[in-house]
Amino acid sequence: MTNLINKLLTRKNLLKLMMIIMLSSVLKMFMDLLTAANSREDEKNRHVKIPLNLPDGVHFFDQVIITKKGKTLTVLSSICPHLGCRIRSFQDDRLVCPCHGSQYSAEGKLIKGPSRNDLTILAYYFDEKEGKIVVDTKKSVI
Amino acid sequence: MSIRKSLSSENILNKSFRRWNRVAPTFGHLDFSAFFIAVVSGIIITVPYDVNNPSGSIQEILLTDESASFFRSIHYWSAQFFLIFVLLHIIEYFLIGREEKITAGSWLRITLSLPAIIYVMLSGYILKGDAEGTMALRIFAGLLENIPFIGSQLGTFLLGPGSNMQVIYIHHAATATIFIWIVIAEHVRLFWPRLIPLAYIFSTSVLLAVFVPAPLTWSSYQGDKGPWYFVGFQEILHWISRPGIAITAFFIFLSIFFIIPRVEKKWRSRLKIAMLFLLISYGAFSAAGWFFRGENWLFILPWSR
Ligand code: FES
């Protein structure tokens, strides 16, 4: 046992260990910084405000897709559940993902893969004072 | 030596490679030179490039700064050469069977440099900051998310927070590049590339930069398929609904690459053939994606486009 410890406790191994400890602490600090920046950014872009007076049809607002049919409003996330690309086109009554071609109905129901899931329906409320719909891009409605 | 042995395909290839190397640099030296030129031209374009306004600053470079635009084209073309010659160098290495002479530690670093090379290439594409680049960023982030346990941490480490490109820029210009440089320098036992291959790559890159300058976007024909080396992967992703499978396949590929020099000769040839088969299949997927996919991933014959 003592032999093994002596063998492992060489100057080179100790230096290596110190290097690993130093590098991991730097990495840990770097990751903490990034994670904090990540949540700050998420929070900053969380709420999207959209004018109330939208005409009927499908409307794209970067993170959000809104389908309006008369009095019915469907608020969808524009993020494709397959790999996260933003959907920004509506053709032949279908929302089409530009990345690998998944297709969804205007209400976000999956029509054709590779995606396996529907688009996320997002929570929203009316801000009467501002005359806007406020969408919470982090909160889904199940 | 028996006639059969001297006529074996491996022997013939071996001889022709040696003959080629007598008159021209090896693919390895060419790829080191291309890498070096990409690094130097990359350093030059860091001056006018603004990571907080990537596509705006590139547009400004293209419109108002001829010399920066020229260096950007050199950066682009040398990077493409680098990737092509890395691939050719690996094929050359496997055909000649030189991999067995490399130590396990060094081969591990070489194996790890492959994802690093993919990372620098893709991050360069992402750093354009246009619609194509942003799309590539989302796909890359989505793929990393699919890696079990460490996926989201790895995504944050490699791609940074949200749409801010600062972290990608740091890794592209420094971390990943330095790592690749160290691996190359250890592999070729040279810190700087040799003059002749450097002259070849530099003159070709300059010619291409003059006659085919790199635009902001190549999109008109390709649609949203990404850079040429990614088209095959995009096509594969179109066919599978679980991206985890593509990630697993990539790790299996890397593991096979790593164990090739360490297995028995008989198995080594089989694994090399398997890798060649995978490469050819990837080429077929790329061709399908490149030629037969139209807008919205519809299958379109090239002549009816
Ligand atoms: S990200 Fe939408 S289909 Fe792949």
Image (spheres, rainbow, N blue to C red):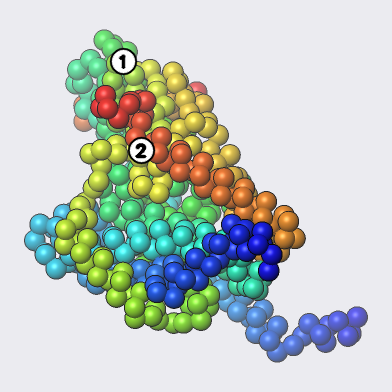
| Residue A42 appears in the picture as rendered | no
Residue at the bottom extreme of this rendering: A11
Is B119 positioned to the left or the right of B151 in the image?
left
Q: Residue B235: x percent and y percent? A: 44, 36
**Total numbered badges shown on the rendered structure:** 2
Residue at figure coordinates x 30%, y 44% from the top left = B132
Q: Which of B144/A62 is in front?
A: B144
Residue shown at 45% from the left, 47% from the top: B141
Left or right of B271 in this view: B166: left
Mark 1 belongs to which subunit? A
Can see residue B202? yes
Q: What is the x, y in percent for residue B298?
A: 35, 25
Task: Give the quadrant of the C terminus of chain B.
Answer: top left
- Determine the residue located farthest toward the left in the rendered image: B64
Q: Amino acid at mark 2?
A: Trp
Q: Which residue bears the numbered disc 2? A: B290
Q: Which residue is mark 1?
A: A93
Q: What is the quadrant of residue B119 in the picture?
A: bottom left
Looking at the image, which is closer to me, B26 or B214? B26
The structure residue drawn at horizontal position 91% and vertical position 80%, both measured from the top left corner, is A1
Rendered location of residue B157, percent (x, y): 48, 58
User: Would residue B156 appear left or right of B61 to someone viewing this image?
Assistant: right
Q: Are marks 1 and 2 in contact (CB under 8 Å)?
A: no
Q: Residue at x 28, y 20 (%)?
A: A91
